[in-house]
């Protein structure tokens, strides 16, 4: 899943980017407000994490411009401003959640997961497909009684397919939600990681859950 982090305080930007990537997210990062607006309007993100005090353009202006352009991406505001008036202003302008600094990374992660589930209309943090179980909060995957060991990239790919279970998802769409904007990887790498996932998920004598849809991409779901 893909996030945009717009935060100008370098130590926080660096630590959040590291933590989010280690949690399996693809993360585009900038500390400039104008560049952040460009990223947000030029790419599709599952969640945008937005600081308010930014050089170039402040966070509330970015928020207003994105909503005026019809961008519906869920936005989590990060700010040192924590008065009731500040929170109400941000939420009334179209923010989806608000987290005051300082905060615990664990709470940020929980809020990001909640916004992601809302994006894909998933209230339950556990997705079940046959005997495959994906815990979105714990980022754990089981098939039957066996817990599967996935790399962050493999998990991110599986999570995105699970969020869109039953739908054919193109290689390009997968690539755009699993890799950073400046990644040197091509969309062909999606086929490689699909292969990795199949080796770990598919089990002899059990139904195949990752299906190739000719000319359209891949689908996670029960075979018809």
Image (tube, rainbow, N blue to C red):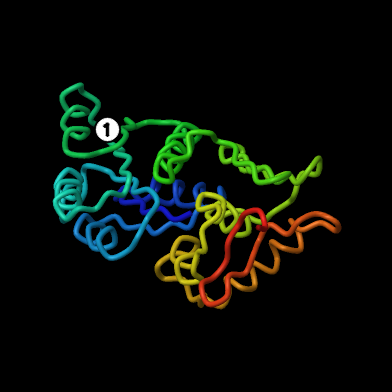
Which residue is pictured at 37% across the width and 31% down the height? 102
Q: Residues within 10 Å of mark 1 (few under 14, many from 20)?
A: few
Q: Could you say which is closer to the camera, residue 125 or residue 97?
A: 125
Q: Could you say which is closer to the camera, residue 202 or residue 110?
A: 202
Q: Could you say which is closer to the camera, residue 120 or residue 3?
A: 120
Side of 16 relative to 10 (left or right): right
Q: Helix, strand or loop at disc 1?
A: loop
Residue 187: percent from left, percent from top: 51, 75
Side of 4 relative to 165 (left or right): left
Which residue is pictured at 25% across the width and 38% down the height? 95
Which residue is pictured at 46% across the width and 47% down the height? 15
Residue 128: percent from left, percent from top: 64, 42
Q: Which residue is mark 1?
A: 80
In the displayed structure, would residue 138 be above or below residue 224?
above
In the displayed structure, would residue 158 be above or below residue 76?
below
Looking at the rendered structure, the number of numbered marks drawn on it comes to 1
Q: Residue furthest front?
A: 224
Residue 198: percent from left, percent from top: 72, 63
Q: In the picture, which quadrant includes the C terminus?
A: bottom right
Which residue is pictured at 69% across the width and 61% down the height? 197
Residue 164: percent from left, percent from top: 50, 53
Q: Residue furthest right?
A: 205
């Amino acid at each position: 899943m893909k996030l945009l982090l717009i935060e100008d305080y370098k130590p926080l930007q660096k630590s959040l980017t590291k933590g989010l990537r280690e949690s399996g997210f693809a993360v585009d990062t900038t500390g400039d407000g104008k560049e952040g607006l460009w990223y947000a309007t030029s790419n599709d993100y599952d969640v945008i994490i937005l600081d308010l005090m930014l050089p170039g353009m402040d966070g509330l202006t970015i928020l207003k411009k994105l909503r005026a352009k019809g961008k519906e991406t869920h936005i989590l505001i990060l700010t040192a401003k924590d008065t009731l008036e500040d929170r109400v202003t941000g939420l009334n302008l179209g923010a989806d959640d608000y987290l005051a600094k300082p905060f615990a990374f664990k709470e940020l992660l929980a809020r990001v997961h909640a916004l992601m589930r809302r994006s894909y209309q998933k209230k339950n943090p556990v997705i079940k497909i046959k005997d495959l179980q994906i815990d979105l909060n714990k980022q754990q995957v089981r098939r039957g009684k066996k817990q599967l060991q996935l790399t962050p990239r493999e998990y991110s790919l599986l999570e995105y397919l699970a969020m869109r279970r039953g739908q054919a998802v193109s290689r390009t769409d997968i690539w755009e939600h699993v890799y950073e904007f400046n990644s040197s990887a091509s969309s062909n790498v999606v086929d490689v990681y699909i292969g990795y996932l199949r080796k770990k998920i598919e089990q002899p004598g059990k139904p195949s859950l990752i299906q190739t849809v000719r000319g359209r991409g891949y689908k996670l779901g029960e075979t018809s």
